[in-house]
Amino acid sequence: SAVISQKPSRDICQRGTSLTIQCQVDSQVTMMFWYRQQPGQSLTLIATANQGSEATYESGFVIDKFPISRPNLTFSTLTVSNMSPEDSSIYLCSVEIGQGSDYGYTFGSGTRLTVV
Amino acid sequence: DAKTTQPPSMDCAEGRAANLPCNHSTISGNEYVYWYRQIHSQGPQYIIHGLKNNETNEMASLIITEDRKSSTLILPHATLRDTAVYYCLVNDYKLSFGAGTTVTVRA
């Protein structure tokens, strides 16, 4: 299975600023996913990022607010732009692993963001 | 939108089996059922998955009904460290999380 390193693990940011979260995988993967988990809530998929193409955003999420880069098969970044306190959440990246009956997903440990 | 429904919470006694139900009545023939858990807002941890046969690993057992419209995750001997939110998901090329079941294991 793949091992994900996500940075930073936590941050406190001022409103109006931007934060870029990095997701590094120890093996090449086709699809990477970014999730948001608001306090006390379940995970919500933000977007799917494939290498060499634009990210696909879920309803309610836009590229201007959450730009994503996917420069190669082992790395992706998510930027939370022009932050407000409502953006305080845990942000997680996930990758697909395996094939066929062993296909699944693994998750990073998350970035806990607090906007003040 | 999540394609599964789970009870919001359940308690379990330490050392006893915990049976977590999940309904996925709209599941398609080639979609797998996955179970993950999340402890203290860490990243979700994979538990087990299956298509139509029952599955068992070192963490749990997964029982899928013959019509595949529901499944049960079994933690055979629950410990206090199994206290977590458990998510049942159906894979349609991306994982959509529902609210999950908050499992509290009590001594």
Image: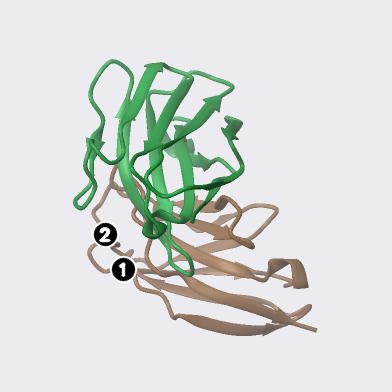
Chain colours: A green, B brown
Q: Which one is in front, A15 or A59?
A: A15
Q: Which one is in front, B62 or A79?
A: A79
Q: Which one is in front, B40 or B31?
A: B40
Q: Which residue is mark 1?
A: B69
The chain under label 1 reads B
> Regarding mark 1 in the picture, which secondary structure is present there?
loop
Q: Is residue B11 left or right of residue B6?
A: right
> Regarding mark 2 in the picture, which secondary structure is present there?
loop
Residue in view at x 52 percent, y 56 percent: B36
Which x, y percent locates residue A12?
Answer: 56, 48
Residue in view at x 48 percent, y 18 percent: A28
The chain under label 2 reads B
User: Is residue A87 among the parts visible in the rendering?
Assistant: yes
Which x, y percent locates residue A41?
Answer: 43, 67
Residue in view at x 44 percent, y 80 percent: B7
User: Is residue B79 among the parts visible in the rendering?
Assistant: no
Which x, y percent locates residue B101?
Answer: 49, 74
Name the amino acid, label 1. Lys
In the rendered structure, are the residues bearing label 2 and label 1 in contact, judged by CB atoms less than 8 Å apart? yes
Q: CA distance from mark 2 to mark 1?
A: 7 Å
Q: Is residue A80 left or right of residue A10?
A: left
Classed neighbour count for the residue bearing mark 2: other residues with Cα under 10 Å, few (<14), some (14–19), many (≥20): some
Name the amino acid, label 2. Ile
Q: Which residue is mark 2?
A: B27
